[in-house]
């Protein structure tokens, strides 16, 4: 395991990162070898990314693009995953976010490993599910 993917604690992340979600994968989320399915991780990343996008757009959002997605380390049953999200761009109707996922392993030894990073874009939608303007910040 490379040193660049280890961290002493999640709070050592840049100040602009906000923890959005913490989950622990269960046996149903993994293959017979105990490795968590990438699709399960992708779903959790999408949920975590949508939270600040929903807040910033003041309403419903829909995922329109997964711009990048990198699995850096495997995820195992029993890992405690923390998802940190940062809004990196706000357009007229869209919001792009960066998501970083850290796994806390061997909780007695406090080993923290960066397992995934992704960039996703959401579009704000109205009741008709068509794109709508994102309101300006107050």
Image (tube, rainbow, N blue to C red):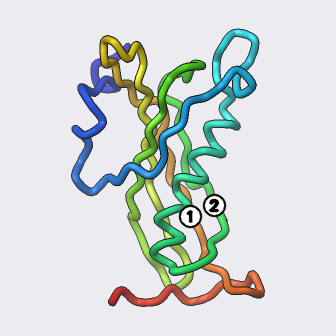
Q: Residues within 10 Å of mark 2 (few under 14, many from 20)?
A: few
Mark 1–mark 2 contact, CB under 8 Å?
yes
Label 2 residue SS: strand
Q: Residues within 10 Å of mark 1 (few under 14, many from 20)?
A: many
Residue 69 lies, in percent from the top left, at: 55, 43
Pointer 2 residue: 65
Q: Relative to residue 86, is residue 66 drawn left or right?
A: right
Instruction: State the residue in front, 25 or 88.
Output: 25
Q: With 85 as the anchor, is 125 left or right in this view?
A: right
Q: Taking 58 as reference, is 8 above or below it? A: above
Q: Residue at left 66%, top 32%?
A: 38
The picture places residue 135, in percent across and down from the top left corner, at 47, 89
Q: CA distance from mark 1 to mark 2?
A: 5 Å
Residues 67 and 96: in front is: 96
x and y percentages locating residue 113 in the rendered image: 38, 25
Tell me which label, 1 or 2, sits earlier in the chain: 2
Residue sitting at 52 percent across and 62 percent down? 51
Marking on residue 130: none
Number of on-image labels: 2
Name the image quarter holding residue 120.
bottom right
Q: Which mark is residue 121?
A: 1
């Amino acid at each position: 395991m490379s040193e660049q993917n280890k961290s002493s604690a999640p709070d050592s992340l840049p100040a602009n990162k906000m923890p959005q979600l913490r989950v622990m994968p269960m046996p149903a989320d993994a293959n017979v070898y105990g490795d968590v399915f990438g699709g399960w991780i992708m779903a959790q990343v999408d949920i975590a990314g949508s939270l600040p996008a929903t807040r910033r757009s003041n309403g419903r959002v829909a995922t329109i693009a997964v711009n990048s997605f990198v699995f850096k380390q495997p995820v195992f049953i029993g890992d405690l995953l923390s998802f940190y999200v940062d809004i990196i761009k706000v357009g007229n109707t869209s919001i792009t976010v960066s998501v970083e996922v850290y796994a806390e392993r061997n909780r007695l030894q406090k080993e923290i490993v960066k397992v995934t990073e992704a960039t996703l874009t959401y579009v704000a939608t109205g009741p008709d599910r068509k794109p709508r303007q994102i309101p300006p910040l107050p």
